[in-house]
Image (cartoon, coloured by chain):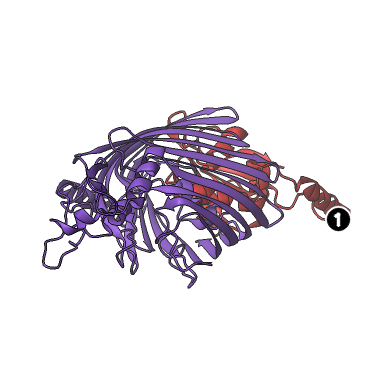
Chain colours: A red, B purple
Amino acid sequence: MRSSSKPVLSLVLVLGVCNGAPAMAPGSFVVVANVDTPALDPDTLQKVYLGKVVEVGGRPIIPVNLTKGNTLRAAFMEQVLEQDDEKFVAYWTVRRYIGKGSPPREFATMQEQLEFLRKTPGAVGYLEESAEIKQGLKAVMKKP
Amino acid sequence: MGKLRRRTSAMWGCVLASLGASSALAVDLRFTGFATIGYAISDQDFRYLRYIDNDGTFKADSLAGVQAEAQFDPKWGATLQLVASAPRTRDDGYEAKVRWAFVSFRPDNDWLIRAGRLRPPFFINTQNAEVGVTYDQARLPQEVYSLSPVYDFDGGAITKTWLLGESELALDGYWGQTDLRYRFPQRDAPVANFRRFDVTSKGLVFSRSTDSLYLRGGFHRVNIQPGDARPAFVVPSARAGEPPIVPTQQLIDTFVPLSIPGPSPFGGTLYLPGNSVSEVVMNVIVLSADWHAGDWRVTGEYGQRSIKNNVLAPGSKGLYATVARRVGKWTPYWTHARLRSDSDLLNLYEAVNGAPVPLLAQLSPPFFPANFHRVEADAIAVYDQYSNMLGVSFAFSATSKLKFEWMRTHVGLTSSLVDGDVHNKSFNVFSVSYSVAF
């Protein structure tokens, strides 16, 4: 369940710095939420994306994802959910077909996700670390 | 029965209307699907699991399903699932049926309430049994998963969950009705006898899961009533022109031995249908465990059907154990599974099936045919078999899986999962299947 690719990620980071690349890890992201979304700790965020938590303090939480294959999504899976994307998909395939819900809504582009996050109270997602956190959004967590 | 049909139609109407409304309101509406194409061939000319013989078949394991999910708001949703597969009411052709049609309400993290057509949790893979990509076996062990021919009920289910640190506890309660066809192979007829029963089931299932261990225990109480006015079986009279021998009962509690005086083969024991019963009450106990450790996975399940008021009802005990180990994308596995009817039922089957019909009974009205006892024996759902399965799955991805399996099954006294006069015999089944979800 625990990520086994963190050493690889670290190595990539080191190589990136040695080559003069910006000191930002590939796949660095910031977890963002609608301003009306309640505060989320890492454990709760994990449970939100696994469908185990759907509300916090009586207010609904709506997780969103980028579509499969996106590098930011892969980084989010590894660092927040502590599992690879294949396991996440397998988990939701079972959960969906035992009638216990659907996986987080997916967006093909960052812009679409951003719009949804801004418009939807309770929504939570993630953006590139360098992205501007626009009005209507707030940062929940920064990784790595 | 009419009431059940009307209720079912109303329920589908509600779910379809919900899905339609969701589309109009542009809420989250998703369509997904799953399919398995599977080929199985045995080394025998008799059929196992309805279709598998030495001619090979795609019908035993192949199916396709589509699912529509509508999320109206964070709490309310609706699901509709349609599956095309081999039919459940006859052996020929294919059929497409609504498996799920339910509205769900999740008021908070801990409660989930569903109403409509749904599949309660019996065994670990009962609910996702038709989605082959969700498990590694080419075919779920029928010694356990055939405990009921149908697991879809029209009714309601409530799930209460407790998140306790690293573990999760859940209590599922449900109530539902269905009309099912129980298949009785007939050795002396070209087609199997599908008898209709109205079934009401209610149960409580408790489960506890952690990252490495999943435990489940369930108790289900099942009430079974005859679903139509058809008798349990019909036997042509031994004399041409005479009316067939038709028991008046739809549900029989046993076969009663009647001693016909005289030396064999003129005299002997004639078994006649016993008392008529209006209902059979069955208690079902299910125990499941699934343990992961690194790449290893061990799964074991046990299912028991207990019936108090009817010797002929299929009381049985079934279990299996699977050991699997993931090696990259490959997951080889071995399964051992057993299914055995209650001793009373096996003894009765053996007595009825093995007794020659006395000649005096064949020569006097109503002229019992010589195969009368065989036909009666075929009206008993009885099982005595075990299987070993050696297989491997290859996961192209989380939603795409190829599977191979060699299964060796041994039938003892007999098994209603086998068509034909098969006893004390072992046979092989080879299966290959490809499952996908999209």
Q: Is residue B172 visible?
A: no
- Residue B337 in percent (x, y) is at 54, 47
Which quadrant would residue B283 be assigned to in this image? Answer: top left
Tag 1: Cα neighbours inside 10 Å, few (<14), some, or many (≥20)?
Answer: few
B41 lies left or right of B307: right
Residue drawn at point x = 18 percent, y = 41 percent: B276
In the depicted structure, whether residue B355 falls above or below residue B294: below
Residue drawn at point x = 24 percent, y = 41 percent: B256
Which quadrant would residue A40 be assigned to in this image? Answer: top right
A109 lies left or right of B244: right
- Residue B158 in percent (x, y) is at 36, 34
Count of numbered badges drawn on the protein: 1
Q: Quadrant of the N terminus of chain A?
A: top right
In the depicted structure, whether residue B82 falls above or below residue B158: below
Q: Check the image and name the residue furthest to the right.
A: A18
Q: Which residue is mark 1?
A: A20
- Residue B188 in percent (x, y) is at 31, 63
Q: Is residue B200 visible?
A: yes
Which residue is nearer to you in this view: B205 or B33? B205
B434 lies left or right of B159: right
Q: Check the image and name the residue furthest to the bottom.
A: B55
Query: The residue under label 1 is which amino acid type?
Result: Gly
Q: Quadrant of the C terminus of chain A?
A: top right
Which residue is nearer to you in this view: B131 or B388? B388
Q: Check the image and name the residue furthest to the top.
A: B164
Chain that bears disc 1: A
- Residue B67 in percent (x, y) is at 40, 57
Which residue is nearer to you in this view: B380 or B404? B380
B266 lies left or right of A22: left
Helix, strand or loop for disc 1: loop
